[in-house]
Amino acid sequence: MADVGLAFSLAIDAMGGDAAPEAVLDGLELAAERHPGARFLLVGDEARVGAALARRKRAAKVCSLRHAPEVISGDLKPTVALRMRGSSMRLAIDAVASGEAAGVVSAGNTGALMALAKIVIKTMPEIDRPALAAIGPSARGDVVLLDLGANVQCDARNLVEFAIMGDAFARVALGLTMPSIGLLNVGSEELKGDDRVRAAAEILRDSHIGAQFRGFIEGHDITAGTVDVVVTDGFTGNVALKTGEGALKLMRDLLRQVFTSSIPARLGYLLARPALDRLREWMDPRRYNGAILLGLNGVVVKSHGGTDALGFAHAVDVAMDMVTHGYNDRIKDGFERLAGRNRLAPSPN
Amino acid sequence: MADVGLAFSLAIDAMGGDAAPEAVLDGLELAAERHPGARFLLVGDEARVGAALARRKRAAKVCSLRHAPEVISGDLKPTVALRMRGSSMRLAIDAVASGEAAGVVSAGNTGALMALAKIVIKTMPEIDRPALAAIGPSARGDVVLLDLGANVQCDARNLVEFAIMGDAFARVALGLTMPSIGLLNVGSEELKGDDRVRAAAEILRDSHIGAQFRGFIEGHDITAGTVDVVVTDGFTGNVALKTGEGALKLMRDLLRQVFTSSIPARLGYLLARPALDRLREWMDPRRYNGAILLGLNGVVVKSHGGTDALGFAHAVDVAMDMVTHGYNDRIKDGFERLAGRNRLAPSPN
């Protein structure tokens, strides 16, 4: 972490998530092994977290504990959470804003994390609006999807910003040198869709990432892996992500019924089990845990509230990738190159 | 069909689709058996369709043939298709506008069908904009989803109209007496989403279908079967449908790989095959073939261009359900009841 030059790689909200602080600390125990040079600032109830930390040798070596007297519950309204000054989430975010840590990971209340991060860490000066991104599986490798709901109403400028942030994220998190980028639409022809997506496509075609831009894609292209980065507004992205997850869940539930429906089917399951287990492992939601708020003056990763140690460790992996590969510097570079090519019109709303 | 009082139940575009006219006529051979009282007006090239019809005994008995000198190809622009007066699709649609047939089924060019139907058959006077609907599978039975792309930009009034059309369609096509209705959003809380969905929800709660309205639902609720009718704008609906289909296809492709990956896995597949075949049959896209353009002065059903006889027969089933159960009268009734409760504000755009 010498290249970052901060006291801590990441601040960790020890109290966020359904099984906190135990699942968080088990996750850090794994993360400590994977990222030997990292230092974590662990924020939470001193007595509870301290006792739990004492039982994890590897995590104890790389974590410093900071007391937070309050916890933001999962159902608390973001507006109320914003007024709590002593929550573990708030103090972890404060550590990023003050320059102690390069990023923050929390499995707590999503709305509160987004609101607090935007207000405390603040949006990068180059960007109009931050976006929520995630990585998911496709037939041709991992795919980045954004925005997932940070902005329910977007204009063309926002979509262009999402493409630039998604490009930088795919380079850092997927290790790609020239990620391909697609704009989600109702058809792949140039005249399809509304003014907003057509205007965004025009800007992207002329931009410095024009060679990576594949134009419009459709819903089925997400899991087909037609592109590495899928760009859309927060309303559509949120619905697409949850619809895709829902369809996969339906199929999993139906397969479970199939394989318990008769004795031969049970036997068949046992025979095919090694291959089915590989499939399950490949599609494991924990491998894709971590929604990333892009475009702030620091790295912010939201772990799923219900995940276990493996899932939390994966969210830490994503945050560490962004910190060590200088994600925010890459975004800045992208916007400078965009400005050099064609100046973005100011957002009308 | 005595209750309809028209010369034909349905006009059929014999030349639409990848395998026309053979697949269309095979589909009608099945439909003739399922709908003994129906009469079909078959529109297409007299020589080709006549020869093909002569080889299908059941279809020949219930079909009258009308010559159409032209065919609208799959990639023709709707604006060009609109100027062709002698296409099989156009003449089939003309038969609905003139009152000869109660509805039309075509497996041809979707954009051309939507444009021609809107201009020739025309929108019902009660409705601002027609919507494209389809039926899909869920964990708790079939689900109606609309709009699927007829309107990429919608206001609150359009969403309310879609709910009323979807309600009537679920009664007719799924045989439900009180279909539950949900409005697709990025969260189920009342404050989520944009002004448009919140305004639509408010109108629906106070409307005559208020007791059926379950409020906001999310993407994963579609395949979970949380509601019978999922209402959304055409952009989001199109993306959701294709994303869900894409996720199911990914899972099917991966399962195929699993079951051919080793000898034990192949054996396992053979043992589980009867149950897997039932699953495949249940999710068969042909069972869900037929996108329905709702809100016109006649029934308009679009069959998938690549479907076979079974799929085309299913599209005819859907159209026949709408014709025999007086779908358009039900919509009219719905709008009269809505107007009685609260008058819809005129659409601002």
Image (spheres, coloured by chain):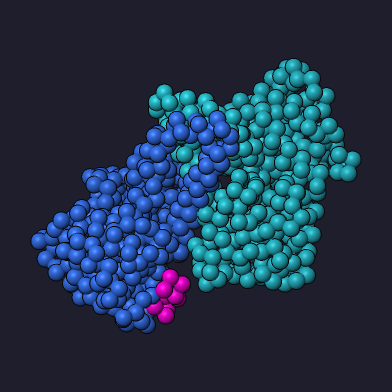
Chain colours: A cyan, B blue
Q: Is residue B77 magenta?
A: yes
The residue lying at 57 percent from left, 52 percent from top is A224
Which quarter of the figure is the C terminus of chain B placed in?
bottom left
The residue lying at 72 percent from left, 72 percent from top is A342
Q: Is residue B239 left or right of residue B344?
A: right
- The part of the image, by quadrant, that contains residue B199 is bottom left
| Residue B259 is at least partly visible in this image | yes
Q: Is residue A310 left or right of residue B281?
A: right
Question: Is residue B17 or residue B348 the one in the foreground?
Answer: B17
The residue lying at 64 percent from left, 43 percent from top is A291
Question: Magenta segment range?
Answer: B73-81
From this view, report whether residue A101 is shown above or below residue B22.
above
Please state the horizontal and vertical placement of residue B41, each as a whole percent of the image.
21, 69
Please state the horizontal and vertical placement of residue A283, each as a whole percent of the image.
59, 38
From this view, report whether residue A179 is shown above or below residue A63.
below
Q: Is residue A136 magenta?
A: no
From this view, report whether residue A37 is shown above or below residue B86.
above
- The part of the image, by quadrant, that contains residue B20 is bottom left
Question: Is residue A93 or residue B31 the one in the foreground?
Answer: B31
Please state the horizontal and vertical placement of residue B185, each as a whole percent of the image.
46, 49
Which quarter of the figure is the N terminus of chain B placed in?
bottom left
Question: Is residue A158 or residue A167 the one in the foreground?
Answer: A167
Q: Is residue B257 left or right of residue B315?
A: right
Question: Is residue B228 or residue B47 the one in the foreground?
Answer: B47
The residue lying at 59 percent from left, 61 percent from top is A183
Please state the horizontal and vertical placement of residue B110, each as a whole percent of the image.
40, 67
From this view, report whether residue B137 is shown above or below residue A265.
below
